[in-house]
């Protein structure tokens, strides 16, 4: 597999590349675009999976960059991952790091970021997946990149033509950027206020027993199952390759975790997909900005 990583300067491309290197990819950063074809040929001879970071630094102009990318993608099959971030986040990151923008000109930083965004617009549109790192620390971005790779493996080795990811999360920490659809479980009873249940999570049997005893929870599960059954063929008709469902509650430990577990198991049992399940707040690591 050949994977090309691109995106805006300061968005986290190097973080994504390091995550792939940890997964066993042969990785190269800031490769001149003119060398892409030769690099791909050599990489595939020696490695099963290879990733390269290509961005505005890789060529003397956007036009020559796109020409080189077009040639490389005509010769080999590439997956393209684009790392994006909001302008205000990029401004803050460059101000904090006090680094010169690679696309730098004599203009102010905000105009430089806008110019780079426009130059890479076509590449973003062609990408298999776009990840926005605005609300992520490096560990969370690396985790998303790893999930992307696992999803791709599921897609390659599965009879299903679409990969489903289910993420539980806390609204206190914001929506998962990768979510296609979001379900709010905050209307359900909260075990947090029951002393013996508060320290547990939706993966623990006492919490599961608590929820299965409640008619409203059972009805919610039924409605979600019906909803998935209804939308799945429509998503397939749109030729969607990745679908991420985020299920949230206040703390991201009880209601959302339980419902994500139940829904993932039901999807698996129905043969709809082989969902990738992640509980964001149960594995959260606090880190520095990208």
Image (cartoon, rainbow, N blue to C red):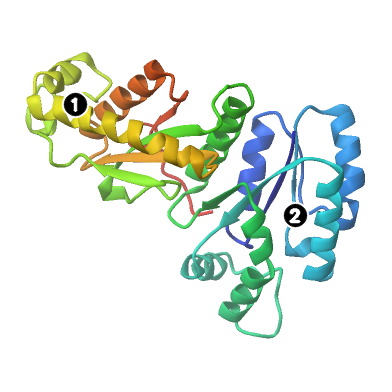
Rendered view: 185 above or below 196: below
* x then y, percent, for residue 199: 19, 26
The quadrant in which residue 111 appears is bottom right
Q: Marks 1 and 2: which is nearer the front?
A: 2
Are there few (<14), some (14-19), or many (20+) residues within 10 Å of tag 2? many
* x then y, percent, for residue 81: 64, 48
Are there few (<14), some (14-19), or many (20+) residues within 10 Å of tag 1? few
> Which residue is found at the position 67% from the left and 63% from the top?
122
Give the left or right position of residue 116, taking residue 207 as reference.
Answer: right
Rendered view: 148 above or below 109: above
| Residue 120 visible from this viewpoint | yes
| Label 2 residue SS | loop
> Which residue is found at the position 36% from the left and 25% from the top?
264
* x then y, percent, for residue 204: 24, 18
> Which residue is found at the position 31% from the left and 24% from the top?
261
> Which residue is found at the position 26% from the left and 29% from the top?
259
The disc label shown at residue 251, or none: none
| Residue 7 visible from this viewpoint | no
Residue wearing tag 1? 199
């Amino acid at each position: 597999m050949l994977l090309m990583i691109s995106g805006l300067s300061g968005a986290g491309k190097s973080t994504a590349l390091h995550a792939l290197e940890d997964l066993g990819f042969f990785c190269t950063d800031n490769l001149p675009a003119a060398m892409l074809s030769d690099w791909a040929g050599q990489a595939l001879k020696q490695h099963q999976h290879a990733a390269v970071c290509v961005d505005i630094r890789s060529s003397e102009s956007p036009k020559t960059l796109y020409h080189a990318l077009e040639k490389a993608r005509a010769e080999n099959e590439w997956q393209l991952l684009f790392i994006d971030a909001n302008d205000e986040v990029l401004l803050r990151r460059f101000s904090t790091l006090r680094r010169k923008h690679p696309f730098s000109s004599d203009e102010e930083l905000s105009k430089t970021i806008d110019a780079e965004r426009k130059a890479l617009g076509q590449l973003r549109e062609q990408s298999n997946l776009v990840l926005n790192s605005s609300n992520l620390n490096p560990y969370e971005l690396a985790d998303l990149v790893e999930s992307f790779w696992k999803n791709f493996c599921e897609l390659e080795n599965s009879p299903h033509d679409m990969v489903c990811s289910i993420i539980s999360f806390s609204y206190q920490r914001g929506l998962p950027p990768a979510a296609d659809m979001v379900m709010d479980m905050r209307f359900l009873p909260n075990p947090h206020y029951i002393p013996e249940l508060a320290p547990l999570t939706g993966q623990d049997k006492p919490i599961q027993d608590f929820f299965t005893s409640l008619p409203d929870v059972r009805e919610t599960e039924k409605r979600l199952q019906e909803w998935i059954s209804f939308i799945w063929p429509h998503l397939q008709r749109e030729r969607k390759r990745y679908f991420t469902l985020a299920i949230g509650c206040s703390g991201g430990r009880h209601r959302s975790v339980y419902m994500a577990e139940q829904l993932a198991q039901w999807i698996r049992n129905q043969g709809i997909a082989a969902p990738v399940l992640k509980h964001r707040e149960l594995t959260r690591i606090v880190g520095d900005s990208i």
